[in-house]
Amino acid sequence: MKNERKTTFLLITIPILALFVCFNTIPLIRGVIYSFTNFKGFGTYDWVGFRNYADLFSDARVGKSYLFTFKLAVVTTVVVNVISLILALALNSKIRAKSFFRGAYFLPNILGALVVGYIFNYFFTYILPAMGAMVGSDSMSKSILSSPDSAWIGIMIVCAWQAVAMNTIIYISGLQTVPEDVYEAGGLDGATGWKQFRYLTFPLIIPFFSINMVLSVKNFLMVFDQIMALTKGGPAQSTESISYLIYNNGMSGGQFGFQSANAVIFFIVIVTVSVAQMKFTGKKEEQL
Amino acid sequence: MKEDMIKRKTNWTAMIVLILGLSAIAFPLYMTIIIAFKQPAEMTNSVGGILSLPKTWSLDNFREAMRVTDFWNSLKNSLVITLLTVALSIAIHSIMGYSLGRNKGHSKFYSFVYLFIVSGMFVPFAILMMPLAKQTAELGLANWFGVIVLYVVFYMPMNIMLYAGYLVNIPIALEEAAKVDGASTWRTYWKIIFPIMRPMHATVAVLTALAVWNDVMTPLVIMAGSDQNTLPLAQLNFQTQFGTNYNLAFASYLLSLIPILIFYIVCQKQILNGVVNGAVK
Amino acid sequence: MKGKAIGHLGISLCCVAAAAGIQGCGASNGSDKTEIEIVQYKPEAAAYFKTLEEQFNATHDDIQLKISSPNDAMTILKTRFIREDYPDIIGIGGDINYSYFVDAEILADVSDYAGLQQIKQAYRDIDEALELVPTEGTYAVPYVANAAGVLYNRDMFAQHGWEIPQTWTEFTALCEEIQSEGILPFYFGFKDTWTCLAPWNAMAVSLAPADVTKQVNRSETTFAEEYREVSEKYLDMLQYAVDDPFAYGYNDACTAFARGEAAMYPIGSYAIPQILSVNPDLNIDSFVMPANDDAQANTLNSGIDLQFCVMADCKNKEAAYEVLDFLLAEENLQQYIGEQISIPCKEGDFTLSPMLDGMNQHIAEGRMTDYQDHYYPSEMAVDAQIQTFLLQKDVDAFLQKFDTDWLRYNRDIIRMVQEYEKTHGN
């Protein structure tokens, strides 16, 4: 009986793992091999050893892109998770027109990058400064996307605007695993509002919280679409994310080999961050 | 009966929060709609000009957008790719999530496989792109089917993570009861666990469908030169470096938004029908 | 039981995979026609090429022509190259990608193509210059060129009696005059970084040597020396431009110029269709950027916008040449330059768009120089560096970074050039 369970699990795991290795691990290894060449993406290439990696650590542009990307990822993750938790709780509570609200809050996630880029560009370039001028605020009457100091805020807003939908869905599905009787029992004990959330709801949805944290950090570290749609790395190269550099210089430019090296390092960094995150939230899960 | 017991008043705090938040969505949506109806000559740089309603509410932009994108054909391709990917994802990822989720706690091997696959999520697509273009061509998969296979692999890490996370709250006792009745593990999974994970299936379906529906890069790279377009690929026609027809583009985006919105509304009802509530205890 | 089920799943997956594979391979058609496939990178000309394709196929029984004009053609081409799935002919611009493709030896030598003799020498020279190291052959047939200078609102100029400036002094005087009448001289769309290159190129052709990048590669000069005047004059232009030009994109600038919010827009002829889409009645003309104070030293910034390269892999070069003959036929080329407002690379009697009137003399006399940025590697992001410079206004820092970055991003090319010169005893 015990063996039957074991073999079944193995028979499930091995073929799917093979599929994964075939279309993820093997191409990754091929990519890693390119990182030791000066391959442009086509034609012939030479082996350059560790030159690409050595360059990576002396390239100010790459260093700047790491700083920008991490700043963006941390801030956006916090903002998105706070908003989407509130939204998920609200959408999950007893409200009217539930389907309408759930549909509406999902919309930002489906609008294509071109539409989002155009509208928010318009918003930041014309509407927000007009509003700022009305209020009489000097700092607000300039487009926030035109200054290297504030452009990241614009990107953060758009990233959050789009990402909230997905995080909310995951929180809502997490809230479904919280049995109603927990609340009933809690209600009898007089737990309401914040207390109910803090001591009853939240501990039960911690697995979803950790999934969302990992997914958010990962998604925002790999931010690309929003950069392309809003600033294309500008102004003054202040919003070049790591993925933007890898894609733009590796694919469109002739730096395929060098950017492969960048991608390898980036992959290692991002895995380290995420494993640390999972370890951390895993401990929290056990504590509760 | 249960319904009666938990019948509470409408939560007005939640309603107010939701209604206030709605403005952040209504405004961009309003702009999308009016721009989709306007003519290029109506586009201005003044705030009043852009917020004004179009001069005429004509469907010409939509008709033209459908013509330029070869709408029905592209829609068919997008639908086939999205639906097959979702179906395969739910079947393959859920069982893999089950297999890994149930074993990673006590087996080094499964815990390694879990971390190995989940870490695949962090591989930047740019590094995979060239090797995949080559590899799919070598395997004769430089077509829509290859795109589906790649999607099933790409979204495997996230979906497995979701399924495994969901399983934490599903008591193992349920399976043990079935096992006592003599059912095999395979059978137990499909008869008991798979249906219980319905809210998660719906979540996975929504997230996967959405990612696939809007994706440009994978079909662009894999199906390049195959004369088959998905909707996002066809929509690239609206923008060139030196000129973009936003009016047609917006009309086209509005059109392609409808199928996925319907899909979401259908799915979100399933997310709601949390079977776990009550049924477990 | 469970084993079976898994087996079924596996088998069915394999079947689908196999079926898809077969479908993918069985696409070749059985007829004995030669198939010629062109991928060209200008999607805005898709309609033109569609008609040409139909006309060609209607008049030729032995060749089946297929032209695709995909968006993001460069990505598509590069991924197709990596899987060794080459089209027969590619239509690309005369920029650094062309240099790379020549270097990668994936293009065929077309020096035996008869039609090449009718291509203007100036453009054939540009292609030669684009080769990283000189080669024996010719690898492209230039089709059309574009030009970048200053677009101006002809009606507004006529109304105020302003005249086309010939020198930098006249140019700045004109800007002062326009400004004094309460009109904005320039609009810029610097939020789209690539637009920063348009005035840069237009000025650099008259102020720096045409082969400045090659001179630097041979360490004969530095950018700090050659580009100083361009940089300083660029900063001068900013004072006549819209406030905070970094807030507006290319599209905003086109719309603003179309609506008469500015008298001039320093950008290439390629922007005209976008401007006209907003205001079809606008009367646009263009003039050569008068960057130099010596009117005779001012040259028109013009480069190859579209050229056709036969791939080395092409099975039937004769058929490819026949297609090229057809594309270069006078009436077809005339139609293209009319629709896209471009300049033909072929000798002959073509009617240019009236929107290029102000540049006519330079075009007729062949006083044209290629875009400098066609020699910049795109990953160096010179456009973004110029944007940074315009924001920070520090000429020295900008030029110093330009020089150091150049050496870093081009070292493989520089090494190649040095090796070439060693072996060829230059």
Image: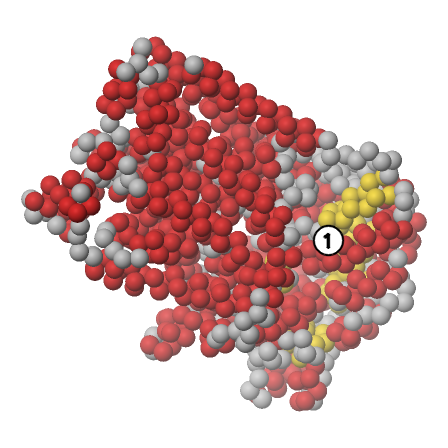
A262, above or below C274, in the image: above
Q: Number of labelled discs? A: 1
Q: Is residue A195 visible?
A: yes
Residue at position x 53%, y 56% in the image: B255
Disc 1 residue type? Gly
Q: Position of residue B98 (x, y in %)?
A: 36, 26
Left or right, C349 with respect to C104, comes to: right
Which coloring applies here?
A: secondary structure
- In the depicted view, which residue is nearer to us: C300 or A183? A183
| Chain holding disc 1 | C
Left or right, A196 with respect to A138, comes to: left
Q: Which residue is mark 1?
A: C93
Residue at position x 23%, y 38% in the image: B277
Q: Is residue A163 visible?
A: no
Determine the secondary structure under disc 1.
Answer: loop
Q: Position of residue C149 (x, y in %)?
A: 70, 70
User: Which residue is outermost to the left?
Assistant: A189
Tell me the crowding category of disc 1: few under 14, some 14 to 19, or many 20 or more residues within 10 angstroms, Cα based: many
User: Which residue is outermost to the front?
Assistant: B1
- In the depicted view, which residue is nearer to us: C299 or B144? B144
Residue at position x 72%, y 76% in the image: C285
Q: Position of residue A207 (x, y in %)?
A: 27, 36
Left or right, C283 with respect to A251, comes to: right
B63, above or below C310, in the image: below
Which of the image's four quarters has the N terminus of chain B?
Answer: top left
Residue at position x 69%, y 55% in the image: C43
- In the depicted view, which residue is nearer to us: A47 or B229? B229
* Residue C209 lies in quadrant: bottom right
Left or right, A285 with respect to C22, comes to: left
Q: Position of residue A129 (x, y in %)?
A: 41, 72
- In the depicted view, which residue is nearer to us: C210 or B189? B189
Which of the image's four quarters has the C terminus of chain B?
Answer: top left
